[in-house]
Image: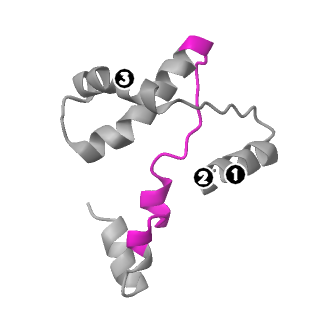
Amino acid sequence: GSPDLSAAREVADYLGTRHHEFYFTVQEGIDALEEVIYHIETYDVTTIRASTPMFLMSRKIKSLGVKMVLSGEGSDEIFGGYLYFHKAPNKEEFHEETCRK
């Protein structure tokens, strides 16, 4: 599995919160594409690729009647979790890249 999944389990355990995991098949992802494109209003491949799992997860959350979700969305951008950020020449340029206004 993803390192994000094990980290989510660890955080949920530490905080004492309920942690749910949801898996979907490739076919379910393909079947959702038309609806995903409709809602995000773009054919951009990167956006669709990132939005499809979130769309399926949101649908599942709604079906469970959940009213609030804690997510790690945005943390890679803030804390430099992407490999792209690991190649920053120095901490000043890393900061400038992640804190653009």
Q: Nearer the viewer, mark 3 or mark 1?
A: 3
Where, by quadrant of the figure, is residue 42 drawn?
A: top left
Of mark 3 and mark 1, the one earlier in the sequence is 1
Question: What residue sits 56% from the left and 21% below the top?
Answer: 61
Image coordinates of residue 88 in percent, x first then y, are: 37, 81
Image coordinates of residue 80 in percent, x first then y, are: 46, 67
Magenta highlight range: 63-85
The residue pinned by badge 1 equals 6
* Amino acid on which disc 2 is placed: Ser
> Is residue 65 at least partly visible in the picture?
no
Disc 2 crowd rating (10 Å Cα; few below 14, some 14-19, many 20+) is few
Q: CA distance from mark 3 to mark 1?
A: 26 Å
Along the line of sight, the residue nearer the viewer: 62 or 43: 43
The residue pinned by badge 2 equals 2
Question: What residue sits 58% from the left and 30% below the top?
Answer: 69
Q: Secondary structure at mark 3?
A: helix
Q: Is residue 90 magenta?
A: no
The residue pinned by badge 3 equals 32
Q: Is residue 70 above or below residue 77?
A: above
Question: What residue sits 45% from the left and 50% below the top?
Answer: 74
Q: Nearer the viewer, mark 2 or mark 1?
A: 2
Q: Secondary structure at mark 1?
A: helix
